[in-house]
Amino acid sequence: MRIDVFTLFPEMFAGPLSNSILKRAQNKGVVEIRLHNFRRFAKDKHHTVDDTPYGGGAGMVLKPEPIFDAVEQLRKKTGWFPLFYLSPKGKVFNQKIALEMSKMERFALLCGRYEGVDQRVIDGLIDEEISIGDYVLSGGEPAAIVLIDAVVRLIKGALGDEKSSQEESFSNDLLEHPHYTKPKEFREMKVPEVLISGNHKEIRKFRENTSYQITLKRRPDMLKSKGEANG
């Protein structure tokens, strides 16, 4: 897979992309991540990428020209790719969308800033707007990092144990079951006996039941949605 990111602050990706799973996935050739600073495409001597909004109002808006030039030049060089804009107005990102995106050969992300981008960028370039939640960030970079991490870990070969991504929260429409490791007892808190019994059938039942109970308590909306989908 290849992921291209259009951003004014490529340095914000340095830490996340050079550590842990994302680093290993790139080193193994599972994913190629390219960063593009669209400020380089601003034509004036000050490399201006934003301006005041027509109609008045607070803040600045990202200009269309540098973004169009950056995206179109890359598409001309490497071929067409879908472009997603990180926006609080977009479809809310979830595990299902992450799984769908993990099956794509390539996609690109546009990180907004300030009051957002000129609407003509959305109308002329963007395939879909995506939000990572109902809150506002200073820019699209943190959201892009979240999306990239969620997608890449689902690509075959990214994780050391392929079962890990299949058994995590949201993968089966339930929150994940509790995890325990050694020692068996810590400060008078004991590991449930069933987990050290060696009975894999009972362990599976225990995990399924605790997943359901945790979801029922913390995210009953997920169970309702699942029921509606099955009904």
Image: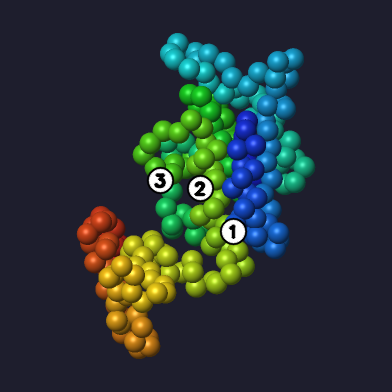
Where's residue 72, x and y in %? 70, 35
Say which label, 3 or 1, has the lower sequence index: 1
Q: Please name the residue shown 38% across and 36% down the image.
A: 135
Instruction: Measure the alpha-carbon separation of dots 3 and 1.
Output: 24 Å
Image colouring = rainbow
The amino acid type of the residue labelled 1 equals: Ile
Q: Which residue is mark 3?
A: 92
The residue at the far front in this view is: 187
- Label 3, residues with CA under 10 Å away: few <14, some 14-19, many ≥20: some
What is the secondary structure assignment of the residue under circle 1?
Answer: helix
Q: In the rendered picture of this protein, how many numbered marks are placed on residues?
A: 3
- Label 2, residues with CA under 10 Å away: few <14, some 14-19, many ≥20: few
Q: Closer to the observer: label 1 or label 2?
A: 1
177 left or right of 115?
left
- Label 1, residues with CA under 10 Å away: few <14, some 14-19, many ≥20: some
Where's residue 186, x and y in %? 34, 70
The amino acid type of the residue labelled 2 equals: Val
Where's residue 192, x and y in %? 29, 77
Q: Which residue is mark 2?
A: 146
The amino acid type of the residue labelled 3 equals: Val
- Residue 174 is labelled as none
Q: Which residue is mark 1?
A: 21
Q: Is residue 63 visible?
A: yes
Q: Is residue 81 visible?
A: no
